Image (spheres, rainbow, N blue to C red):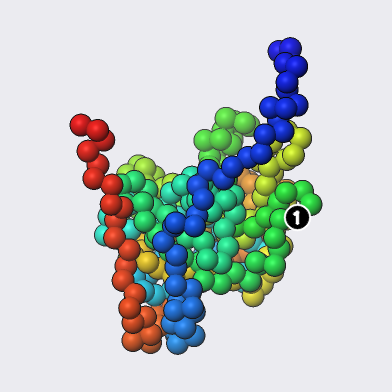
Amino acid sequence: MTTTPPDAEARRAITPVICYPTETLPKPDLPLYLHALRSASVVESVTVAPRDAATFRVPAGAFFRIVSVEGPQVGDLNVWNAADLSERFYSGKTRALHGTHVSTGDRLWSSFPALRPMATIVEDSLDWYGIDAFGGSVHDVIGTRCDPYTGNLLSGSQYHHCCHSNLTRALADATGLPLPEAEAQVHDVLNVFMCTGFTRDTGQYFMKASPVRPGDRITFFAEIDLLGALSACPGGDCSSEHSSDAAPCHPLRIDVLVPASGSLDGWHPPSPNGYDRSHGR
Ligand SMILES: [Zn+2]
């Protein structure tokens, strides 16, 4: 619709710069975490039923692991500060810092004003996948969570087992909050095991069958006391559709692991962000 300017190619040819170089981010001590993980034992296992969600609690300095069982399945993860639900996972800032998909060494950052690492990924059995020919990769922080409002907008449906509703029910059950208050705490997710990207021609969000297989797992170190909720997405492996009961779905398992005492010597939970919050006034 607009006339292309004569210097269009020159403008397009400008080299991009990384918005947030991560060299100055506080680095996780992965060798220490892996040392602690080797000593850790499972203290609790929670099974998430297909098209439903479950919650779990992880003390700071412990681990949680999401495991594929029975068949390929995608999970939608929410994480809160167990002592203050207003501090919760901030997928947009995590994306800005680490990129569209996360893996070993990346961290789940919390909302303002705390903006600190809530969890650190210490192992990921799908880290071999990389970025495929379509631009797809695994464990994204670019999607939202499937929800009944978008389904209603697009097709007039009333579907009650989208991840948004599953997470809402699970959080209400875990906290005793009324459903509307629990719903207000549900936030954009880490799409665990989901394979997604943006199409190169139209820039649209796409998904494709997840490469996850039973036995695959992703393990997180809890930097602060966490309340987590995981939904086994009604999209199953997300190869075709979600927001319906059409896709084959499988459970997911969450293991909470506590390391041997003394195995984290020298580690301290991260402090909330140091900005003074005066905002120029
Ligand atoms: Zn979903």
**Residue holding disc 1:** 132
Q: Is residue 137 left or right of residue 108?
A: right
- Rendered location of residue 128, percent (x, y): 70, 67
Residue 106 visible? The answer is yes
Q: Left of 203 or right of it: where is 171?
A: left
| Quadrant that contains the N terminus | top right
Q: Residue at x 37, y 66 (%)?
A: 223
Nearer-the-camera pick, 210 or 5: 5
The percent position of residue 50, horizontal first and vertical second, equals 58, 60
Q: Within the image, what quadrant is residue 259 found in?
A: bottom left
10 Å crowding of disc 1: few (<14), some (14-19), many (20+): few
Instruction: Classify 136 as above or below 126.
Output: above
Q: Residue furthest right?
A: 133
Rendering quarter of residue 155: top right
How many numbered badges does the structure rendering display?
1
Residue at 71%, 56% (x, y): give it.
131
Image height of 216 relative to 143, above or below = below
Q: Nearer the viewer, residue 7 or 92?
A: 7
Q: Secondary structure at mark 1?
A: loop
Q: Position of residue 96 (x, y in %)?
A: 51, 46
Tell me what residue is drawn at x 20 percent, y 31 percent: 281
Left or right of residue 194: residue 178: left
Q: Is mark 1 within 8 Å of ligand 1?
A: no
Q: Residue at left 52%, top 35%?
A: 149
Residue 164 seen anywhere in this rendered image of the structure: no
Residue type highlighted by circle 1: Asp
**Residue 125 at what x, y percent from top left?**
63, 71
